[in-house]
Image: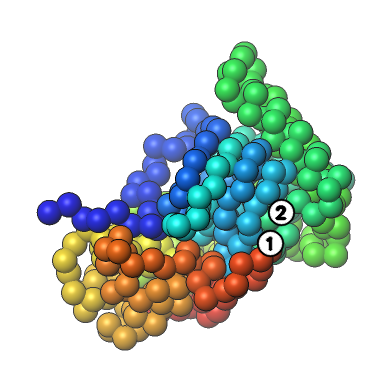
């Protein structure tokens, strides 16, 4: 028996998306009608710009009804989504770029790493602000679309230049100085330093991995690892690991008939109640509701469940508050 489609789909394996030999992927998406929301959690920084129409998007604790010229910028391994929930019908065209930090390298913008833009709160990494800013972002989005579609020689170089121009505009528009300090600046070397930890979680998504173990794998003390991981990813290792484990739980719920008790044990949760609480807080629905999505019931996407529609809104955090969740 084929499982019904779920409104929230998480890619199973993304190992083939990006690697050192291929640090860039890009494309143009065209949607017409209801678009089932996709939950994304992957290696690589993602930049998307809406070119036409309207689309619901979400990053971490923020969601947005995007209009042409709106941008959404997600960090590596940050939960984000886009789409519309039936019965809403919308048409939309968006350009997206997914890349590893080494694609941009050690470029600086006004004396700070370009990656500092990723330390902004999610609400400042979605939307475009003023009409003037929206127009400039839209111009960059259209140029990206042309380069990606035509794939002329050196198109990747043009895409890299467009991304740097976009980050420079965002740095100026978002007044980065009031949000960041030198201690919060992300450097590509920080990502490289904690990559063994990311790979370990990716290869064992259902395991509750001790921070001391991944710190040792990266060659750092526990304290130094904690600092580097927060700088690179924007959250503690404990919260990041729990996000991966909950993604594993979601996959098990949809693909197997295992009980919640069995899945809780596989994913390193204390018991069924512990898993139920963590899953509901992260996904905005209970494990049972998630398992039966597509059977005629409709739930809002995680960042909008229970919220009235508005152009930009804050919602409860998707990955919990504790540094070392269970």
**SS at badge 1:** loop
**SS at badge 2:** loop
Q: Is residue 91 left or right of residue 167?
A: left
Q: How is the image coloured?
A: rainbow
Front-lying residue, 51 or 102: 51
Q: Which residue is drawn at 76% across and 41% down?
A: 137
Q: In this view, does 172 lie to the left or right of 190?
A: right
Front-lying residue, 260 or 244: 260
Q: State the image coordinates of residue 233 (x, y, percent, origin top left).
A: 58, 59
The quadrant the C terminus occupies is bottom left
Q: Which residue is drawn at 40% across and 44% down?
A: 14
Q: Residue at x 80, y 64 (%)?
A: 179
Circle 2: is it few (<14), some (14-19), or many (20+) Cα within 10 Å?
Answer: many
Q: State the image coordinates of residue 54 (x, y, percent, origin top left).
A: 61, 48
> Looking at the image, is 86 positioned above or below residue 222?
above
Q: Which of marks 1 and 2 is in front?
A: 1
User: Disc number at residue 2?
Assistant: none
Q: How far apart are marks 1 and 2 (CA)?
A: 9 Å
Q: Name the residue under label 2.
A: 127
User: Disc number at residue 311?
Assistant: 1
Q: State the image coordinates of residue 172 (x, y, percent, origin top left).
A: 86, 50
In terms of image quadrants, where is residue 132? Answer: top right
Are discs 1 and 2 less than 8 Å apart at CB? Answer: yes
Q: State the image coordinates of residue 153 (x, y, percent, origin top left).
A: 62, 13
Circle 1: is it few (<14), some (14-19), or many (20+) Cα within 10 Å?
Answer: few
The quadrant the N terminus occupies is bottom left
> Looking at the image, is 153 positioned above or below residue 224?
above
User: How many numbered marks appear?
Assistant: 2
Q: Which residue is drawn at 55% across and 42% down?
A: 91
Q: Is residue 234 visible?
A: no
């Amino acid at each position: 028996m084929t499982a019904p489609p779920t409104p929230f789909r998480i890619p199973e394996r993304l190992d083939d998306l990006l690697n050192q030999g291929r640090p860039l992927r890009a494309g143009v998406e065209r949607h017409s009608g209801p678009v089932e929301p996709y939950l994304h959690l992957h290696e690589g920084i993602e930049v998307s710009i809406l070119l036409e129409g309207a689309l619901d998007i979400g990053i971490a604790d923020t969601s947005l009804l995007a209009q042409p010229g709106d941008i959404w910028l997600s960090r590596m391994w940050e939960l984000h989504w886009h789409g519309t929930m039936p019965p809403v019908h919308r048409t939309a065209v968006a350009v997206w770029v997914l890349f590893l930090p080494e694609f941009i390298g050690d470029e600086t913008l006004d004396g700070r790493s370009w990656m500092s833009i990723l330390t902004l709160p999610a609400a400042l990494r979605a939307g475009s602000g003023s009409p003037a800013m929206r127009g400039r972002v839209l111009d960059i989005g259209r140029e990206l679309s042309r380069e990606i579609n035509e794939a002329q020689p050196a198109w990747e170089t043009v895409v890299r230049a467009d991304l740097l121009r976009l980050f420079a505009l965002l740095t100026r528009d978002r007044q980065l100085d009031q949000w960041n300090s030198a201690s919060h600046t992300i450097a590509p070397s920080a990502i490289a330093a904690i990559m063994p930890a990311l790979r370990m979680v990716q290869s064992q998504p259902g395991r509750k991995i001790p921070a001391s173990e991944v710190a040792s794998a990266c060659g750092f003390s526990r304290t130094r690892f904690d600092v580097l991981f927060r700088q690179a990813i924007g959250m503690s290792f404990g919260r990041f690991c729990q996000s991966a484990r909950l993604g594993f739980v979601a996959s098990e719920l949809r693909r197997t008939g295992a009980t919640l008790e069995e899945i809780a044990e596989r994913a390193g949760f204390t018991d069924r109640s512990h898993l139920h609480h963590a899953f509901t807080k992260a996904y905005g629905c209970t494990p049972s509701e998630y398992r039966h999505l597509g059977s005629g019931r409709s739930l809002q996407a995680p960042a909008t469940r229970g919220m009235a529609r508005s152009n930009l809104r804050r919602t409860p955090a998707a990955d919990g508050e504790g540094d070392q969740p269970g």
